[in-house]
Image (tube, helix red, strand yellow):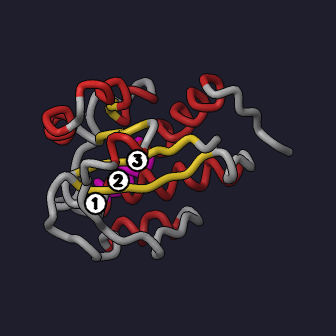
């Protein structure tokens, strides 16, 4: 059994690929790669096929997280059945997901910062700001990734492997 996690923002070039890369790194560190798979997508089709924003990639690489292999895609209807967790970065994108998600899969939806304490409700979009916004988002997503991984491990009976 594999737990599948999808991270979602608007264009899938800043927040959601960063969340995917951070969470993927946490999963690898816990040696749960064969138990948990990840992906990311955008609610809009602005950047399909594009790599993550250069500022997001640079921020991640400064902290030894490589996300250069990721490419933007748009959320599609099968995602709601294929993924156990569909995690939005903000309320606007969560509302778009709720509007297109079948009723039976609504319980799979959450906000990324539901999984972290002390950061507020939403991961702000750093796209139109400076480098400091990408650093803050990286820190938020790091905390939330750890919380989400702890929840998944506990809920699905997964234990870190040494």
Disc 3 is placed on an element classified as: strand
For label 1, the residue is 12
- For marks 2 and 3, give the CA distance: 9 Å
Do callouts 2 and 3 mark residues in contact (Cβ within 8 Å)? Answer: no
For label 3, the residue is 6
Q: Nearer the viewer, residue 4 or 29?
A: 4
Q: Which residues are magenta?
A: 132-140
At 64% from the left and 41% from the top, the residue drawn is: 1
Do callouts 1 and 2 mark residues in contact (Cβ within 8 Å)? Answer: yes
- Estimate the x, y position of residue 126 in percent, counting from the top left: 24, 55
- Magenta-colored segment: predominant secondary structure: helix
Q: Residues within 10 Å of mark 1 (few under 14, many from 20)?
A: many
Q: How many marks?
A: 3
Disc 2 or 3, which lies upstream in sequence? 3
For label 2, the residue is 16
Disc 1 or 3, which lies upstream in sequence? 3
- Estimate the x, y position of residue 118 in percent, counting from the top left: 40, 25
Do callouts 1 and 3 mark residues in contact (Cβ within 8 Å)? Answer: no
At 36% from the left and 71% from the top, the residue drawn is: 71
């Amino acid at each position: 059994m594999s737990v599948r996690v999808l991270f979602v923002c608007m264009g899938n070039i800043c927040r959601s690929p960063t969340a995917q890369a951070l969470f993927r790194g946490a999963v690898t560190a816990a040696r749960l790669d064969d138990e948990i798979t990840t992906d990311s997508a955008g609610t809009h089709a602005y950047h399909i096929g594009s790599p993550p924003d250069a500022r997001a990639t640079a921020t991640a690489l400064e902290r030894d997280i490589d996300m250069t292999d990721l490419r933007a895609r748009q959320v599609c209807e099968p995602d709601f059945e294929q993924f156990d967790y569909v995690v939005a970065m903000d309320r606007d994108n969560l509302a778009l997901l709720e509007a297109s998600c079948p009723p039976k899969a609504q319980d799979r939806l959450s906000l990324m910062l539901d999984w972290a304490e002390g950061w507020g409700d939403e991961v702000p979009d750093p796209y139109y700001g400076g480098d400091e916004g990408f650093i803050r988002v990286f820190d938020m997503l790091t905390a939330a990734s750890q919380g989400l991984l702890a929840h998944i491990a506990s809920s699905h009976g997964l234990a870190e492997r040494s």
